[in-house]
Image (spheres, rainbow, N blue to C red):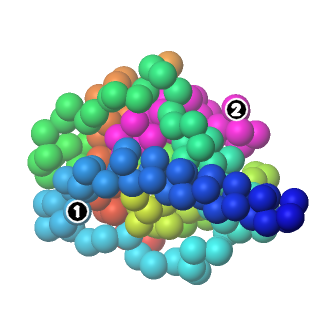
């Protein structure tokens, strides 16, 4: 009887979490998909590859918190104010190259030179860009602004380093799945 009750509670919990995720994410459509005539992220080693869900943990604790409790209050209602233009995406690409590519890699697979010895590895943005969560402005801004310290990763907090518009531009770049070509 106890195992039946536990299974029932677990099933209800999963349904509540799924319903909450759909409520917060379903109305959000990725406004950047197909933007500006550039190519999508190249497919990497798969969803279970290094970085996001690989053997060293990746950024799953952040995803778990967002799914269970949402993002922290200062970020719950933020929306990207930048125009959906090629210039915004180009600005995001420049910010990515300067601030993100050394760890996340030129194609976003979490395999940048500076990130190779980090544990956990930098997040795989190819995988992230395909998840509904990556299309959620509050999640993306929170991730970049606050960095990974609360979750035991080496990602720095960029809120004191990048302007708000630079954070939004790189968010747009990641959401649009528009990395630079591998060199």
- Residue 70 in the figure: left or right of residue 59: left
Q: Is residue 146 magenta?
A: yes
- Residue at x 76%, y 40% (from the top left corner): 152
Q: Percent from the top left, x then y, of residue 143?
A: 52, 38
- Residue 113 in the figure: left or right of residue 95: right
Q: Is residue 147 magenta?
A: yes
Q: Which residue lies under the disc numbered 2?
A: 150
Quadrant of the rendering where the C terminus is positioned: bottom left
Give the magenta-colored segment's residue range.
135-157
Asked if residue 81 is positioned above or below residue 5 in the image, the reply reads above
- Residue at x 16%, y 60% (from the top left corner): 35
Asked if residue 165 is positioned above or below residue 59 in the image, the reply reads above
Disc 2 is placed on an element classified as helix
Disc 1 is placed on an element classified as loop
Residue 15 circle label? none
Distance between the Cα atoms at labels 2 and 1? Answer: 30 Å
């Amino acid at each position: 009887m106890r195992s039946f009750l536990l299974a029932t509670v677990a099933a209800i919990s999963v349904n509540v979490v799924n319903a909450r995720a759909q409520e917060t994410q379903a109305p959000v459509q990725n406004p950047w998909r197909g933007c500006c005539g550039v190519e999508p992220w190249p497919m990497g080693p798969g969803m279970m590859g290094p970085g996001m869900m690989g053997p060293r943990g990746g950024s799953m604790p952040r995803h778990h918190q967002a799914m269970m409790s949402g993002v922290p209050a200062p970020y719950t209602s933020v929306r990207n104010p930048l125009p959906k233009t090629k210039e915004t995406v180009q600005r995001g690409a420049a910010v990515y190259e300067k601030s993100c590519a050394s760890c996340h890699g030129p194609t976003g697979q979490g395999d940048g030179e500076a990130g190779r010895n980090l544990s956990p590895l930098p997040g795989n943005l190819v995988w992230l860009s395909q998840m509904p969560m990556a299309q959620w402005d509050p999640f993306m801004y929170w991730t970049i602004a606050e960095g990974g310290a609360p979750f035991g990763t080496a990602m720095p907090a960029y809120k004191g380093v990048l302007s708000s518009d630079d954070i939004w531009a790189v968010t747009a770049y990641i959401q649009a799945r528009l990395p630079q070509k591998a060199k």
